[in-house]
Amino acid sequence: MLFLCSANFSDVFAIFSFALGFSKHLNALLTLNGIVFGTLNFVAFFATSYFAAEVSREDSMIRKRMKSVAFNLSVSKDTKGHLLRRFIQSKTGIVLTAVGVMNFSRGFLLTYAGVLVTYNLLMVQLNTID
């Protein structure tokens, strides 16, 4: 976020310095600014995506730990039938990760597939050959 704010500030600063006559080469200044802050914004975007995906991974780890604690507590109560029913009813989420950067859940993948099918059907229907 700091890179995004500083990139916008540096664009405004480059334009003002050219307008006030401090810099005679606006194109070189903006090109250098674009290269430096474009690279920083690229890195910041993927770093933010990676750390946002970490939240989901930490949540799944905590849920697994809580499930094991609940399992151990329920084993000690001699309620094996109730425990077996709970184990059968429990579902694990299907999550695909893109090298740990983003998580794609089953709902997202089904929605994405639905959007693709709908878009293709729309394109087929609108394709009129004269």
Image (cartoon, grey):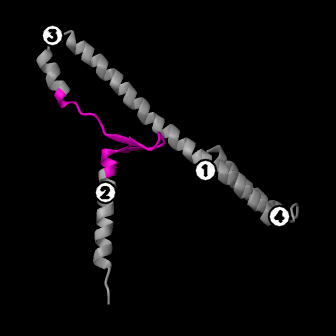
Observer-nearest of 80 and 129: 129
| Above or below, 47 relative to 74 | below
The amino acid sitting under disc 2 is Ala
Tag of residue 78:
3
Which mark is on residue 113? 2
Mark 4 Cα-neighbour bin, 10 Å: few <14, some 14–19, many ≥20: some
- Magenta stretch, residue numbers: 88-109
- Estimate the x, y position of residue 124 in percent, counting from the top left: 29, 75
- Residue 105 disc label: none
**What residue is at 42 percent from the left and 33 percent from the top?**
57
Asked which secondary structure carries label 2, the reply is helix
Q: Which residue is mark 1?
A: 42
- Residue at horizontal 51 percent and vertical 43 percent from the top: 49
**CA gap, disc 2 to disc 1?**
28 Å
Q: The N terminus is located in which quarter?
A: top right
Where disc 1 sits, the SS reads helix
Quarter holding the C terminus is bottom left
Cα distance, mark 2 to mark 3?
45 Å
Label 3: state its secondary structure.
loop
| Residues tagged 1 and 4 counted as in contact (Cβ below 8 A) | no
Label 4 belongs to which residue?
Answer: 18
Q: CA distance from mark 4 to mark 3?
A: 79 Å
CA gap, disc 1 to disc 4? Answer: 26 Å
User: To which quarter of the image does residue 112 belong?
Assistant: bottom left
Could you tell me residue 25's position as x and y percent? 84, 65
Q: Amino acid at mark 1?
A: Phe
